[in-house]
Amino acid sequence: MTRLLGDQVLMRIFIGETDRYEHKPLYEALVELLRREGFAGATVLRGVSGFGAHRVYHSQKLLDLSADLPMVVEAVDTPEKIDAIMPRINDMMAGGMITLEKVTVNRYSPKT
Protein backbone atom coordinates (compact mmCIF):
# COMPACT_ATOMS: atom_id res chain seq x y z
CA MET A 1 0.00 0.00 0.00
CA THR A 2 1.16 3.50 -0.82
CA ARG A 3 2.23 5.62 2.13
CA LEU A 4 0.63 9.03 1.72
CA LEU A 5 0.68 10.56 5.16
CA GLY A 6 1.91 14.13 5.28
CA ASP A 7 2.18 16.77 2.57
CA GLN A 8 0.86 15.67 -0.84
CA VAL A 9 -0.93 17.18 -3.86
CA LEU A 10 -4.64 17.22 -4.70
CA MET A 11 -5.30 17.29 -8.44
CA ARG A 12 -8.74 18.34 -9.67
CA ILE A 13 -9.62 17.83 -13.33
CA PHE A 14 -12.68 19.79 -14.48
CA ILE A 15 -14.32 18.40 -17.62
CA GLY A 16 -17.77 17.96 -19.19
CA GLU A 17 -19.87 14.84 -18.93
CA THR A 18 -19.91 14.39 -22.73
CA ASP A 19 -16.12 14.77 -23.15
CA ARG A 20 -14.61 11.69 -24.75
CA TYR A 21 -11.23 10.02 -25.14
CA GLU A 22 -10.92 7.20 -27.66
CA HIS A 23 -14.71 6.61 -27.80
CA LYS A 24 -15.13 6.36 -24.02
CA PRO A 25 -16.17 8.95 -21.44
CA LEU A 26 -13.11 11.02 -20.55
CA TYR A 27 -13.73 10.71 -16.81
CA GLU A 28 -13.62 6.90 -17.12
CA ALA A 29 -10.45 7.01 -19.21
CA LEU A 30 -8.79 9.30 -16.64
CA VAL A 31 -9.72 7.06 -13.69
CA GLU A 32 -8.45 4.00 -15.57
CA LEU A 33 -5.15 5.78 -16.31
CA LEU A 34 -4.71 6.82 -12.68
CA ARG A 35 -5.45 3.27 -11.51
CA ARG A 36 -3.00 1.72 -14.00
CA GLU A 37 -0.31 4.16 -12.89
CA GLY A 38 -0.70 3.13 -9.25
CA PHE A 39 -2.31 6.25 -7.83
CA ALA A 40 -3.60 5.98 -4.29
CA GLY A 41 -7.18 6.58 -5.48
CA ALA A 42 -9.44 8.75 -7.60
CA THR A 43 -13.00 10.00 -7.30
CA VAL A 44 -15.37 11.35 -9.95
CA LEU A 45 -17.92 13.95 -8.87
CA ARG A 46 -20.88 14.94 -11.05
CA GLY A 47 -22.01 18.53 -10.74
CA VAL A 48 -25.62 19.67 -10.88
CA SER A 49 -24.74 22.91 -12.67
CA GLY A 50 -21.82 25.00 -13.81
CA PHE A 51 -20.06 26.80 -16.66
CA GLY A 52 -16.56 26.86 -18.09
CA ALA A 53 -14.31 28.85 -20.39
CA HIS A 54 -17.04 29.26 -23.05
CA ARG A 55 -19.42 30.61 -20.37
CA VAL A 56 -22.18 28.19 -21.44
CA TYR A 57 -24.37 27.34 -18.46
CA HIS A 58 -25.04 23.63 -17.96
CA SER A 59 -27.74 22.57 -15.54
CA GLN A 60 -29.41 19.38 -14.43
CA LYS A 61 -33.13 19.56 -15.17
CA LEU A 62 -35.71 16.84 -14.75
CA LEU A 63 -36.62 16.70 -18.44
CA ASP A 64 -33.18 17.54 -19.85
CA LEU A 65 -31.36 14.20 -19.98
CA SER A 66 -28.83 15.39 -22.55
CA ALA A 67 -27.25 18.14 -20.41
CA ASP A 68 -23.45 18.22 -20.54
CA LEU A 69 -23.03 18.43 -16.77
CA PRO A 70 -19.73 19.33 -15.13
CA MET A 71 -17.55 16.47 -13.91
CA VAL A 72 -14.61 16.67 -11.54
CA VAL A 73 -11.99 13.93 -11.24
CA GLU A 74 -10.02 14.21 -7.99
CA ALA A 75 -6.85 12.36 -7.04
CA VAL A 76 -4.36 12.80 -4.20
CA ASP A 77 -0.82 11.52 -4.47
CA THR A 78 2.82 12.58 -4.26
CA PRO A 79 4.02 15.63 -6.17
CA GLU A 80 6.32 13.38 -8.21
CA LYS A 81 3.47 11.12 -9.36
CA ILE A 82 1.26 14.09 -10.23
CA ASP A 83 4.08 15.76 -12.21
CA ALA A 84 4.87 12.54 -14.08
CA ILE A 85 1.27 11.91 -15.20
CA MET A 86 0.42 15.50 -16.16
CA PRO A 87 1.64 15.35 -19.81
CA ARG A 88 -0.48 12.24 -20.47
CA ILE A 89 -3.56 13.82 -18.92
CA ASN A 90 -3.05 17.00 -20.94
CA ASP A 91 -2.86 14.91 -24.13
CA MET A 92 -6.21 13.28 -23.30
CA MET A 93 -8.06 16.57 -22.82
CA ALA A 94 -9.41 18.87 -25.53
CA GLY A 95 -10.65 21.47 -23.01
CA GLY A 96 -11.29 21.74 -19.32
CA MET A 97 -9.13 22.83 -16.42
CA ILE A 98 -6.70 21.18 -14.02
CA THR A 99 -5.92 22.61 -10.59
CA LEU A 100 -3.30 21.49 -8.09
CA GLU A 101 -3.11 22.30 -4.42
CA LYS A 102 -1.04 21.21 -1.47
CA VAL A 103 -2.88 19.05 1.04
CA THR A 104 -1.96 17.25 4.23
CA VAL A 105 -3.05 13.62 4.40
CA ASN A 106 -3.87 12.64 7.98
CA ARG A 107 -5.27 9.19 7.24
CA TYR A 108 -5.02 6.80 4.31
CA SER A 109 -5.90 3.16 4.82
CA PRO A 110 -8.34 0.57 3.47
CA LYS A 111 -11.45 -0.46 5.38
CA THR A 112 -10.85 -3.43 7.65
Image (cartoon, rainbow, N blue to C red):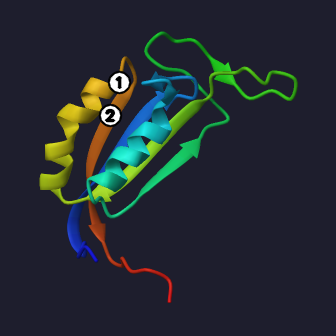
What is the quadrant of residue 78 in the picture?
bottom left
Closer mark to the observer between disc 2 and disc 1 = 1
Q: Is residue 56 above or below residue 29?
A: above
Q: Would you name the residue on which mark 1 appears?
A: 93
Pointer 2 with pointer 1, Cβ within 8 A = yes
91 is higher (above) or lower (below) than 47: above
Kindly identify which residue carries mark 2.
98
Q: Nearer the viewer, residue 25 or 107?
A: 25
* Front residue of this view, candidates 102 and 35: 35
Q: Position of residue 40 (x, y in %)?
A: 32, 64
Horizontal and vertical percent for residue 45?
55, 46
Kind of element beneath mark 2: strand
Using a 10 Å C-alpha cutoff, classify the residue at mark 1 as few (fewer than 14 neighbours), some (14 to 19) or many (20 or more).
some
Label count reads 2
Quarter of the image with the N terminus is bottom left
Question: Is the residue marked by circle 2 packed among few (<14), some (14-19), or many (20+) residues within 10 Å?
Answer: some
